[in-house]
Amino acid sequence: MLFNPPKKKAEGTAHSKIILLGEHSVVYGKPAIALPFTSLKVTATVDTTDSSNLLIDSETFLGTIDEIPKKMRGIAACIKETLKNLGKDEKGLRISLHSSIPIGRGLGSSAALAIAIVRGLYTYFDQKLDRKQLMRLVNIAETYAHGNPSGIDMMAASSEHPVWFQKGKETLPVSIGAPFYLIVADTGRIGDTKSAVDSIKLNYEREPEATRNSINLLEDYTIRARDALNEGNIVLLGELLNLAQIELDKLGVSDEGINNLVNLAQKAGALGVKLTGGGKGGCIIALASNANQVKEISNILLKEGARNTWYVKVAESKKAITSQIQ
């Protein structure tokens, strides 16, 4: 391959994601509902450099791709495979990364980073990128990060719309019958998804019936939540979030810090509250009835120990949007 990079700059972007319901049960083939969380984003800027090797410029690492630290090797593998797919050389390129997504909080930071990089490289070389190619390339980084990822993170982080995800099946849009507000609160602690998944496996061995019952209930709540979203029944959605949190706590993936924020948000009037993502740290989500309540709940959570809070307004949408999930 000849080194002849174009003299220009290109950007790729991606946003965070929230799992509304179905985390952990999705590992067992059950459905989950995930939302794009556009308040937090990643930007990958690709431009030229005089270096003889591809440079990575990020907040945690500055150097060549071959010097990349172990925790970023999935990203390096994704970059190399993307360039191979494009038929391009690594020389003379620089990828600058900027992310507002906190790492290890269950918000899809690794998936969003890989999506932004792949999009940036394809844009830089003026090549068309379809969803199948994007998912294949991003999955390389996700496999390094999570071992055997379900795929929900990269699907939600690459979509502009809420999605219904079930491993091995077509990802579908979720229609929203009435707008609603979600608060995302950071416990300030990195979640431990692997430990949480392993603890559920252990529970299956020790208490198979109780564990199976919790997984089945999470499936039921997710199915009912899709209907509630479609009908615009936000009160029912809140009840289902609360019920899901009870089962997640039984499964051992919640913890004292999460439960404390959940209880505070419930007492502050949230319609429903639960952890989101892997658990054992990370974030919670709280369903608010209006914009004023968002501020009230956020202030209480921040005062009582949340590291940070954000919110998202999920807009009403009845369109057939499957083709836009890219």
Image (cartoon, rainbow, N blue to C red):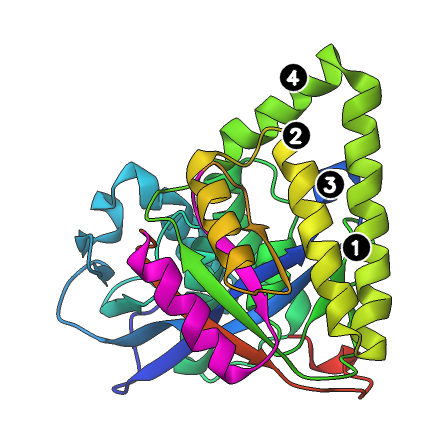
Mark 2, Cα crowd under 10 Å, few <14 / some 14-19 / many 20+, is: many
- Mark 1 / mark 4, whichever is N-terminal: 4
Start and end of the magenta stretch? 281-304
Answer few, some or many: residues within 10 Å of disc 3's Cα (few below 14, many 20 plus, some between 14 and 19): many
Quarter occupied by residue 240: bottom right
Of the two numbered discs 3 and 2 on the same chain, state the one appearing first in sequence: 3
- Relative height, residue 238 to residue 144 (above, below): below
Q: Whole-Å distance between the Cαs marked 1 and 3? A: 10 Å
Residue 184 sits inside the magenta stretch? no
Nearer the N terminus, badge 4 or badge 2? 4
- 40, above or below 247, in the image: below
Q: Which residue is mark 2?
A: 251
Point out the image quarter for the N terminus: bottom left
Res. 80 in view: yes
Tell me whether circle 1 and circle 3 mark residues in contact (CB < 8 Å). yes
Give the secondary structure at mark 3: helix
Residue at 55% x, 49% y is: 277
Q: Earlier in the sequence, mark 2 or mark 1?
A: 1
**Residue 198 placement (x, y as % from top left):** 59, 24
Which residue lies at the image location 64% right of the left edge and 55% below the top edge?
Answer: 152
**Residue 25: numbered disc:** 3
Identity of the amino acid at label 1?
Answer: Thr
